[in-house]
Image: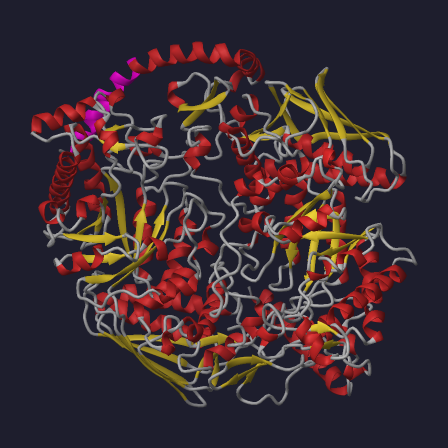
Amino acid sequence: MDKRWLVMRVAAILVIVHLVSCNDNSIDSSKPAASLYEPSWTYKCIPDEGCQRSESPQPGVHANMSSLTFESMDLCRTVCGRFGGLWPRPITAALSTQTVKIHPNYLRFDLSNAPAETREVLVQMTQVTTQNLIDECDGNVTEIVETPVVVYITVKTSNLNLTWDTDEQYRLDVQSKEKNAVIHIVAETVYGARHGLETFSQLVSADKPDYTDHYKCSLRLVSGAKIWDRPVYKYRGFLLDTSRNFIPMDDIKRMVDAMATVKMNVFHWHVTDSHSFPLESRRVPQFTRYGAYSAYDIYTVDEVKEFIHYAKVRGVRVVIEIDSPAHAGNGWQWGKEYGFGDLAVCVNAKAWRNLCIQPPCGQLNPANPAMYRVLRDLYRDLAEILPKPALFHVGGDEVFFNCWNSSEEITTYMKNQGYETDVEGFIKLWGEFHEKALKIWDEELADAGHAAGQPVMIWSSELTQAHRIHKYLNKDRYVIEVWEPVNSGLLPQLIRMGYNTVSVPKDIWYLDHGFWGNTKYSNWRKMYAHTLPRDPNVLGGEVAMWSEYVDSQALDTRVWPRAAAVAERLWADPAGAAGGAGAAEARLNRLRSRLAARGVRSDVLAPAWCAQHDQHCL
Amino acid sequence: MKSWGEAQWRSASSNFSRVGRLRRALLLLAAAACTAAGVLYWRQQTDDSAHRPLQSMLAGVEPQWSWICRNDRCERLLASETSIVQSLPTCNMLCASTQLWPQPTGPVSLATAAVRVRSNGFSLKVLASPSRQVTEHLNDAFFLMRDDLRTLERTAGIENRRSDSATRDVLVRVAVNGSGDPRMKQDTDESYKLALRPSGKSLVVDITAHSFSGARHGFETLSQLVWLDPYTSSLLALEAATVEDAPKFRYRGLLLDTARNYFPVSDILRTIDAMGACKMNTFHWHISDSQSFPLRLTSAPQLAQHGSYGPGAIYTTDDVKAIVRKARLRGIRVLIEVDAPAHVGKAWTWGPLEGLGHLAHCVEVEPWSTYCGEPPCGQLNPRNPNVYKLLERIYAEIIELTGVDDIFHLGGDEVSERCWAQHFNDTDPMELWIDFTRRAMLALERANGGKAPQLTFLWSSRLTQSPYLERLDKKRYGIQVWGSSRWPESRAVLDAGYRTVISHVDAWYLDCGFGSWRDSSDGHCGPYRSWQQIYEHRPWIEEMPSVATGAEQWRIEGGAACQWTEQLASGGLDARVWPRTAALAERLWSDRVEGATADVYLRLDTQRSRLLAKGIHAAPLWPRWCSHNPHACL
C-alpha cells in the first residue's frame, strides 16, 4: 500500500515538473509559430448577450484573463445571466459572478438539523450530489484545493412519503470567504432538500477548456447565491414504455438520473402492453414466461424494488401502469392451457386491422371471472412492491369494441348482464371492468397495509368523455391523464367537473411523434412553448416516450433534452418575453453538457458555433 | 387467496402436459414437413446437446421461444411446446428469405442447412491477384472480416472456446483477375461471384472478382452467411451457397457533415464499418463549413487553428489516414469536400495577419439573414489570388491523404450574391461565381499533377441552372442534385446530360423532420424521411425520358444520403443514420423493382441486428414483437 502511494506521489511530482517546464517554454518563446500551439477560444460573459467566443483563438495559457472571461464555456454559463446555468430555473435567484475553487474531498454535509429518520436517505442523496460534482470533471478532479466546503441541511419534517402533496420547496444560500465556503439548504422535506442539493451541484462547474483532451480539471463554485425555489406544478412526469421494445434497467436508471437533474418527480412506467410483459410477478410467473421477449428481458421483483428506492433517492416517484382492459395480450395468452379459459381475447390475432389499432391485438376478457383472479394476484404483487402511499395507473385507453364483439363468450356475458352490444353497451362493460378492478386494487392494497382510498390514474378515452365520465369514474378516486391533442376541449371540461388531471397533449409532448404516420416532431422549442392551465385540478404534465421505434440504442437522444424543456415548463412555468425559448437556450446548452457529464447523451440544439455565440442564431 | 397461485400452478401443469403433448405431436408433423432437411441435419449435427436449450449465456436461464419455419415464415412458439428449440436468427437464415443485404442482383442459391464454424477456422488463400498491393489488401480485408466474426463470438463469450469435431474449418479462396489498383475508383468493377460448398470436413468458399473491391464485397456477403445462434452459443454458417452479384449504380454514398457539429474519429470509423456492411462505396465527408473547419492540414494549419471549435475538435492528418485506410479495406473511398466559395467562415480570417489580404468576406456578419442562409455567414474573396494558391494546397493535400484522384467535390452551393455584390459592385456576382469555379478548377488541376479528375462534382445551385449550366463542361463536371425531386431545375440538369449523383432533399436528406433550430424560422425541411420512403424513391424510373423521345439519356452515377448536422452531434449519430442509410444502400446496389415489401422488412431487420453486433447503435424498425413474429405486423 505504502509503496504504491509513493510511486503515485513521484508520478504526480513528475507531472507537475513537466507542466511547469511547458509553461516556461510558452512564456519564453515570444510569438509561437502558427503550428506550435493548439487553437483555443475563450468565452466572455457579456450582460444581456450571454457568453461570447473570443474574436480569435488564444495561444497557450491565459495569464491575465479578466474576471468574466473563461476558457470553459460551461463555467462562463454558470455565472452568466440572472439564472446562470440552472435548469430548471428557480423562482428567485441572486447569483454572484465570482467563483471559488473547491474539491469534493473537502466537501462535507452537515445533517444535524435534519430529523434522525431522514438522515439515511439524506446521506444517499448527498452521495449522488458528490458523484455528480466529480462527474463534472469526467470522474477526476485533478486540482486539489483544501478549502473546506460545508453544506448544512435543514429538514423540518421527518415525513419520507413522496406524493404530489409533498412540499418540494427549498432555500439555498451560498457564502464563501477566502478560507471556506458555507452552504445552507433549508427545506420542509427531504425531497425539497434534494432539490436544493441538485441546484447546489448546478452552481458548480468544471473549468477545463471546451473540446479539449486536457487531463487537468478543477471545480469552481459560484461564490455567493441566494435562491428560493418551489415548483409550479406538483406532477412533473416522464413516461417510458418498456413493452413495445424492452429497455434495460441501466437505461431506465439513467433516465431517472436525468429526471432528477431537471427536478422531474414522476416516472410513469408503462411496463406492459399487448406486445410483451416484462414485469416479473411472483404469484403469476406465467406473465413473463408467456410475455417476455426472452429470459433476459425481464424486470425481476428485486430489480424493481431496488429501482423504486433508487428513484426515491433522486426525488422521483415510480408509478407503474398495467394497461387494461385493452393493450393486454402477450403474457395473458396461457389461460386455456391452464384450465382458466381465455384471460384475454384477440391475442395476436392475424387480421389485426379489425381488432386493434396496432399489432399485436389483445384485450382482457371481462366475461371470465378467472381473469379477475389473475389480476388480483398481479395487483397483490404490485401492492407489495409499490412504496406507500401507492400510486397506480390502470391504463384504460383505446378499448376496441370490435375485439370484444368478436368473442361469443363476451357477447353472451353482455346479454346476461343486460348490456346491448352497441357502443353504450360496451362502454358499460368497460366501466364495469374498471369498477371491479378498482375494488380488487383497493382490497389488495389494504391487505398489503396501505391506507384506504389511494388515487388511481387512468388515461382519457371514450369512457372519460364529459357526458359519461361521472357514471363510471369517481372523481375522488381517479386522476385522469388527458392525452387528447391541444385543441381538444376535454381537459378544461374535466377540470370544471372537478377531476384531477395530468396533461400529456399528444401532438406536443409525445416524444415518438414525427417518426411514423402523419405525426409531427415537436422539438424542444415547441415543447417548451406549450403551457398548461393554472388550476388546482391540473396536477401537472408529462412527456411520453412510447417505444415502438426506440430501444436501448436510440433512447437518450430521443428523450433529452426535449424532456428537460417540459421539466422547466412544469417546474417554473416562465412567462413573458423572458419565458421564451430564446432566453432559455443558453441554460439548456449548459444542461446538455451537464447531462453528458452524468452519462446521458442528449441531442444537440444547434450547430456548436451557435452554442459558442449565445443569441447569434436567432 | 394466498394458496391460489400454487393451486393454479398444480392444476394447470397437469392440464398443460396433456395439451402440450398433443401440440408437440402436431408440431413435429408440421415442422418435419417443411424443414425436414434442416431438422434432420440439426439432429445429427449437434448430437448430444441437440434438441433442448443447449447452453445459454446465463446458467439456468432457458430460452422461452422457439421459431419454426412454416409456409416460408418463422413462427414463434413457446420453447416448452416444441421438440426443436431454434432461435430466431437461425430460423430466419434457414427459412425462405435470403437474409442478404443488399439483395444480390444475380442468381442466388442457398442451402437450408447450417454447420458450426468458428472465426479461427477461417483461412484465406489468394489464388490469383494482379498485384502485390491487391494481395495485401485482400489479406487485410479478410482479417477485418474475421475480426467481425470474432466480435460476434465475443458477444456470446465463446471466442476462446475450443473447436470440436462438429466445427468446420472454412477455406476462402480468392481470385482477382483485373485491376491491380486496390482503390475504389470510377471504373472499378465491383462484381463478384461466390461459391460455398462442403468439402470433406471443411467448407470451401471460392470468390472471384475483377477488383479488390469486388472481392471484398464477396467477403461481406460471406460474412452475412454466418451468424451467431444465441441458443447454442455458436457461430453457424450455411452449408452451401452460390451468389452472383454486381451493383446497379456505381456511386453509393453517405454524406456526413462534421462542420456544424464535430464528430470524433471513432464515430466516423463506426460509420465506415456500417457502410461497408451495406456495400456502400463513397464516404462523402463534408468536412468544413462556415461554422467550423476541423481538418488540420499540414499545408495550411491556420485553417483549423482559426476555424475549429477547439483543440479536441480536430482531425489530424493521421486521423484522416486511419479513416482512409479502414475505408479502403471496406471498399469505400473517402471523398473530402471543402465547400467553397460559400459556406466558409472564421477559418479564413487570418489572411491580413499573414499579409495575404482578405481571403474571405462577410465572415460572421450581421444581420446574417441578409448574407447567407444560416448563421454564421462567410464567402471566399474571388478576387484574391492567394485564395486559389491556398485552395491548390488544400486540394493537393486532400488528394494525397485520400488517394482519390479520379473524382473530386468542389462544393459550390448557396452562394450569396448580396455578399459579393457589396464588395464588388462592378461585376455581376454570377460572373464572379463562374470565374471562381473556373479558377478553383485550375487549382484542382495543378493540385492533381496537371490533370483534371475524370469527374468533379458541384452541388446543384443557381450556377447549375440555365443560362449558367451550359457554361460548365460536361466532360469535367458532375452535379450532385440536392433539390427536391419535383423541382424542374433538378430535372433540367439530368435532361441536359450531366453526370449526376442524386441526393433529393425530399427523399434522401436524413436531417429533415426535426423542426427548426432557430427561433425565427418555422423549420428546416420536413417531415422525417422514413426508411420506407428512402427505399422506394426511384426517380430514374418515374421520370427518365424514354429512348424513343430522342432526348438525352440521364446519366445517373448513383446517389447519396445526406446527414447534415445542424441538429445532430456525437451520441445521436448512429440511430439517426442507421438503418435508414442501409435502405438507400440496397436501393442503389440492387434497385429492386419492388418497394418495401415484407421480405425487405425482414431482411432489413436482420441487417439491423448485424449492425448492432458491429457496435452500431441503429434504431429499431418496430416493436420487437414484430421481429419475433415475422410478417405479423404488415
Identified at 35% across, 26% down, the residue is: A351
The answer to if B3 sits in the magenta stretch is yes
> Is residue A39 visible in this depiction of the protein?
no
Nearer-the-camera pick, A19 or B138: B138
Left or right: A566 as drawn, with respect to B247: left
* Residue A307 image position (x, y, % from top left): 33, 52
The answer to if A547 sits in the magenta stretch is no
Left or right: A237 as drawn, with respect to B505: left
The chosen color scheme is secondary structure
Compared to A437, does A386 lie above or below? Answer: below
Q: Which residues are magenta?
A: B2-18
* Residue B18 image position (x, y, % from top left): 29, 13
Instruction: Give the position of the C terminus of chain B as an image quadrant.
Output: top left
Mostly what secondary structure, the magenta segment?
helix
> Is residue B276 visible in this depiction of the protein?
yes
* Residue A167 image position (x, y, % from top left): 21, 69
